[in-house]
Image (cartoon, rainbow, N blue to C red):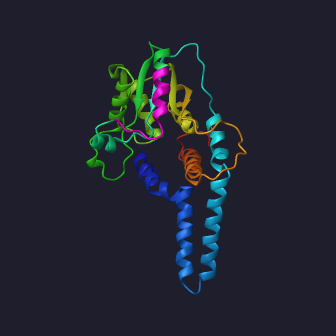
């Protein structure tokens, strides 16, 4: 499967495989079945099952249980010398940035703060950003790329974009690693890779597979790393955590099957 085919495949099946959407589809299936006489009992059971799943997810920190192993897999590296620092694109929003006239990024804002702190800690290090556009549809309507959003954000944080090498063509984590390597030629240089903690296993695996000598600089933690027993009633937050975790676990398995990484659980 080519990289382009894999990208389209992930964009089409990604929303369908998301746990929150899966529960919604299960509920809709139950409603449709319950409307008919023959399948009414089955439909009511599916509706009840959907409600029970949502109740369990709302009360129990299932998302934290799934996310913690991902976030704990690669703790921050402490190096004696750093040659470069690379910030990985994640959820920048080029279209909203164009429409609103200011840089918009969803949950990855803390990635930029970590990157800025590392830049100050290693003032002589090379700097890079990797990320083009992850849009599948309406791409012609979006004038900017993730790299354009990053330029604005880094400028706001006081980082000279003249120092930063921007790779602005990649659409996936695999392409991030391969295209950045072709642009920068890192060789044996020691690079810190800044990415969300839950995304770090797949990111580190992809970059190392592409020949990078990278070390983790995780950001954007969503858990405290412990096996939480806290109970509550927060369906939206728990569903978001589960969706993030599921995306990464599925991504690790798919990347492994496609040969992009050597193990579904990188070390």
Question: Image quadrant of residue 9?
Answer: bottom left
User: Magenta region, mostly helix, strand or loop?
Assistant: helix
> Residue 32: x, y in percent?
52, 77
Whether residue 255 is visible, yes or no, is: yes
Q: Quadrant of the C terminus?
A: top right
Q: Is residue 160 above or below residue 200?
A: above
Q: Is residue 46 above or below residue 86?
A: below
Question: Image quadrant of residue 172?
Answer: top left
Task: Tell me the residue at 63%/55% (across/down).
Answer: 58
> Residue 211: x, y in percent?
51, 28
Q: Is residue 105 above or below residue 140?
A: above
Q: Residue furthest bottom?
A: 37
Residue segment shown in magenta: 103-117
Task: Tell me the residue at 53%/66% (across/down).
Answer: 25
Question: Image quadrant of residue 252?
Answer: top right
- Tell which of 172 and 234 is nearer to you: 234
On the rendered structure, is 165 left or right of 68? Answer: left
Task: Tell me the residue at 28%/44% (across/down).
Answer: 99
Q: Is residue 259 one of those drawn in magenta? A: no
């Amino acid at each position: 499967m080519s990289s382009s085919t894999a990208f389209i495949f992930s964009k089409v099946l990604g929303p369908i495989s998301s746990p929150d959407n899966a529960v919604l589809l299960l509920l809709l299936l139950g409603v449709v079945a319950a409307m008919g006489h023959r399948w009414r009992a089955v439909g009511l059971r599916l509706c009840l099952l959907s409600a029970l799943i949502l109740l369990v997810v709302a009360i129990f920190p299932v998302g934290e249980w799934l996310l913690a192993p991902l976030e704990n897999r690669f703790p921050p590296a402490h190096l004696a010398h750093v040659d470069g620092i690379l910030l990985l694109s994640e959820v920048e929003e080029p279209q909203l940035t164009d429409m609103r006239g200011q840089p918009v990024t969803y949950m990855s804002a803390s990635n930029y703060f970590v990157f800025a702190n590392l830049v100050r800690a290693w003032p002589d290090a090379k700097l890079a950003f990797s990320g083009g556009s992850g849009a599948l549809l309406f791409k012609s309507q979006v004038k900017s790329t993730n790299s354009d959003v990053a330029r604005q954000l880094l400028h706001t944080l006081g980082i000279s974009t003249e120092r930063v090498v921007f790779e602005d063509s990649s659409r996936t984590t695999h392409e991030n690693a391969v295209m950045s390597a072709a642009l920068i030629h890192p060789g044996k240089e020691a690079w810190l890779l800044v990415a969300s903690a839950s995304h770090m296993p797949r990111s580190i695996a992809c970059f190392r597979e592409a020949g990078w000598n990278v070390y983790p600089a995780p950001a954007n933690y969503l858990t405290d790393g412990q096996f939480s027993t806290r109970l509550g009633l927060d369906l939206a937050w728990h569903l978001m955590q589960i969706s993030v975790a599921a995306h990464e676990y599925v991504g690790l398995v798919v990347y492994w099957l496609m040969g992009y990484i050597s193990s579904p659980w990188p070390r």
